[in-house]
Image: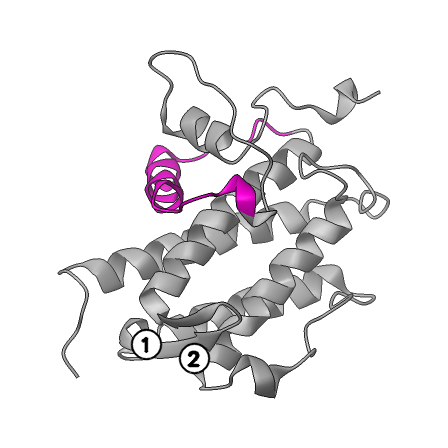
Amino acid sequence: MECPHPPGFHVEVRERYTAAVAEVTRLVRAVPEDGWTTPTPCRGWDIHTLVNHLAAQHLWVCQAVAGYTPETIGHRFDGDVLGRNPVGVWVLAADTAVRALYQPGAPDLQVHLPYGVRDVGGYARELTAETVVHSWDLARALGESGRMPPGAARYALAEFQGYRHLAGSGMFDPPLGTAPGADAQEQLLALTGRDPNWSYDALP
């Protein structure tokens, strides 16, 4: 099968994806025992809900790459997938997803997703972009600055800029304005409806 992607795509998407999930792993390991109900910048979501969302998404990866469809996966990853071991479940989800993506030729495979058929490379780009944004959410909820590596912010921004009607998907708040000269992270946060100055301490 002829590779549909440009030179270097496989290496970049794997490296970006691996780095994004590694940052979430670092942050998840930093959640204090009593911190799982801490609010996040995601409207109505606490840390547990956010990590559960991420884990469920990434548990899909190895299933999809293995050829399973939404019909065969069914409701396996609905509801609370974290159980009593949220850190362990996230690490399992991240590790199995990375291994699936590193299978020879994996980025060129076609996978069946809830919204249609897509190549694994494009699917990984999508997940990477969302994971980068959610790592900021998690970092801010934990009181960190949330400063993204510039390359990660640019990569995620480029992916999200290719989506139409982002706010209309129901997954993001309406985009915010940015000041002239805003960097990639500031543009990314604004595009996904996030206040760069969000702070748990400032909540009413």
Residue 31 shows in this picture: yes
Residue 169 horizontal/vertical position (percent): 55, 49
Q: Which residues are magenta?
A: 144-168
The residue singled out by tag 1 in the image is 106
Q: Secondary structure at mark 2?
A: helix
| Residue occupying the point 60% across, 35% down | 173
Residue at (57%, 30%) from the top-left corner?
A: 194
Looking at the rendered structure, the secondary structure element under dot 1 is: helix
Is residue 147 shown to the viewer in this render? no
Numbered badge on residue 65: 2
Question: Can you tell which quarter of the image residue 81 is in?
Answer: bottom right
What's under tag 2, amino acid-wise? Val
Q: Residue at x 59, y 88 (%)?
A: 72
The three-letter amino acid code for the residue at tag 1 is Ala
Q: Is residue 155 magenta?
A: yes
Q: Position of residue 13 (x, y in %)?
A: 32, 58
152 in relation to 50, above or below: above
